[in-house]
Structure formats: C-alpha cells, structure tokens
Image (spheres, rainbow, N blue to C red):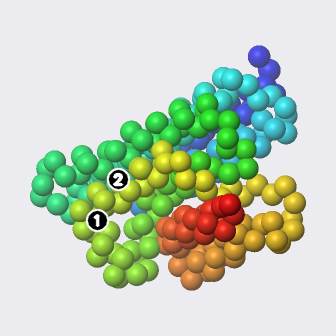
Amino acid sequence: MTIKSQTPNSLTLLNLLSGVIGILFVLQGKVESGAYFIFLSAFFDFLDGFAARLLNVAGEIGKQLDSLADLVSFGVLPGFIIFKICESNTELIWLPYLTLILPLLSAYRLAKFNIDTRQSDRFIGLPTPANALFFSTLLFLGDKWEVIDSWIQNPWVMVVLAWIFSILLVSEIPLIALKFKTFSFSSNRFRYGLIGLALLMLAFFGLGGIPLIIVAYLALSMVENAATSP
C-alpha cells in the first residue's frame, strides 16, 4: 500500500466526509449550508477519478468506495434536503417520507451503473450528481424567482419532483455525456448547446440556474435522441 495508490481513495473519502458534514448541517435546519457540501463532494468526486487516471491506479476497491461515497453525498444528502423542505411546509407527518424514494433509487442507480457497460459515451438514466445538484439548488432558484419559490414551498410539488427524478435515475433514457471524442461542431452540437445554455443560466441566476441547466440537459438529450434515432 503506497501513498500513490491511496491518493484517489483519500479524495473519495473527502467526498464522503463532505456528504456527511452536509447531512449534519441539514439536520440542524441549515438546508442551504448543507447544499454547498454537495458542490464540495462533486469537486472531490471529479478529483478522485482524475487522480486515478493520472496515476494509473484505478482498482476495484476504489470503484466500490466511490459508489459508497456517492450514495451518501449524492443520494442521502439530497434526500435529507428535500425531506426537510417538504417537512417545513406541511403538517402532514407522513408526507415528507414520500420523498425518501430519492436516496433509495439513487442507491439502485449507483449499483446499476457499476455493472452497466453501455455508458461509455452516453449516460443511461440521470446521473446521481446531476440529480443531487438539481435538488440542492432549488432554494437558490426560489430566491431568484418568486413564482418558483411558491412551488418549492408546496410539499406536494416536492413529492412529485422526488418521484419523477427518482424514476429518471433508473430509467433507460440515453442522456448526453460531456465526453468529446472530437471537437467538431457537427458531432457535438448538443454538447456545445448545453454548455452555452449552462453559461447563460449561471450568468443570469447564479447557483439558482443549476436546476434550469439540469432541465435543459434532459430536454436536449430528448431532442438528440429524436434527431439520431433511425
């Protein structure tokens, strides 16, 4: 066991630690603060994969550890966030528990991803980090857009969103992956379109633009599927 071989795993553990700390913030009622730790987890999630490829030390332990960390950071933490939002806006004790479908199907998604060999250049179903970013930044969008805020504060809307996005996690819908084999516009027009829309939405709404980016991502993927289907 060397420092080189454990560097990616150490970054994965920092991903996990970020998710655990985020959960603690949400449990204290600091939902927006907890949401920031999803960004930190995503940063470490990117770094561990980058380090594994750079150092050529990818292994089965790292793969399994990555999935366990992702379950906490991109499954349990956003599940707690949406549960808390729903709980704070309803007197129905049982209603917030319906949102817990989110971490359950996030776990199923991660297990499925580990054994699915089809996802080399496209994702099959919504990736857990994208799902987590959607729910963790809804409050930021609500701060920017009053109409959206009224929807977010409606517990039934949040339950419906939790179920829709949970189904998308385990769906068989092919979705765009930002993996470029070439940089030609003709073969990557939907990827470039997504990047352009993302920049515009972030410029106008800041972090509140992320849910809109995820919706645009889903919409562009559907358009691409229609355009490329035989």
Horizontally, residue 193 falls left or right of residue 5, namely left
Of residue 12 and residue 49, the one placed in the foreground of this image is 49
Horizontally, residue 55 falls left or right of residue 41, namely right
The residues tagged by marks 1 and 2 sit, at their Cα atoms, a distance apart of: 10 Å
**Element under label 2?**
helix
Of residue 225 and residue 56, the one placed in the foreground of this image is 225
**x, y percent for residue 206:** 55, 75
Of residue 43 and residue 82, the one placed in the foreground of this image is 82
Q: Locate the C terminus and report the quarter of the image it occupies.
A: bottom right
* Label 2 crowd bin: few (<14), some (14–19), many (20+), radius 10 Å: some
Residue at figure coordinates x 12%, y 55% from the top left = 92
**Residue farthest toward the front in the current orientation of the protein:** 230
Residue 164: name its quadrant: bottom left
* Label 1 crowd bin: few (<14), some (14–19), many (20+), radius 10 Å: few
**x, y percent for residue 155:** 24, 62
Quick check: can you spot residue 40? no
**Residue farthest toward the top in the current orientation of the protein:** 1
Residue indicated by mark 2: 163
**x, y percent for residue 46:** 69, 47
Of residue 180 and residue 131, the one placed in the foreground of this image is 180
User: Which of the marked residues, 1 or 2, is nearer the chain's N terminus?
Assistant: 1
Which kind of residue does numbered mark 2 sit on? Trp
Residue at figure coordinates x 30%, y 50% from the top left = 99
Q: Locate the N terminus and report the quarter of the image it occupies.
A: top right
Residue at figure coordinates x 51%, y 58% from the top left = 133
Which kind of residue does numbered mark 1 sit on? Val
Residue 197: name its quadrant: bottom right
Residue indicated by mark 1: 157
**Element under label 1?**
helix
Q: Check the image and report above or below for 224 versus 175.
A: below
Horizontally, residue 159 falls left or right of residue 47, namely left
Residue 188 got which mark?
Answer: none
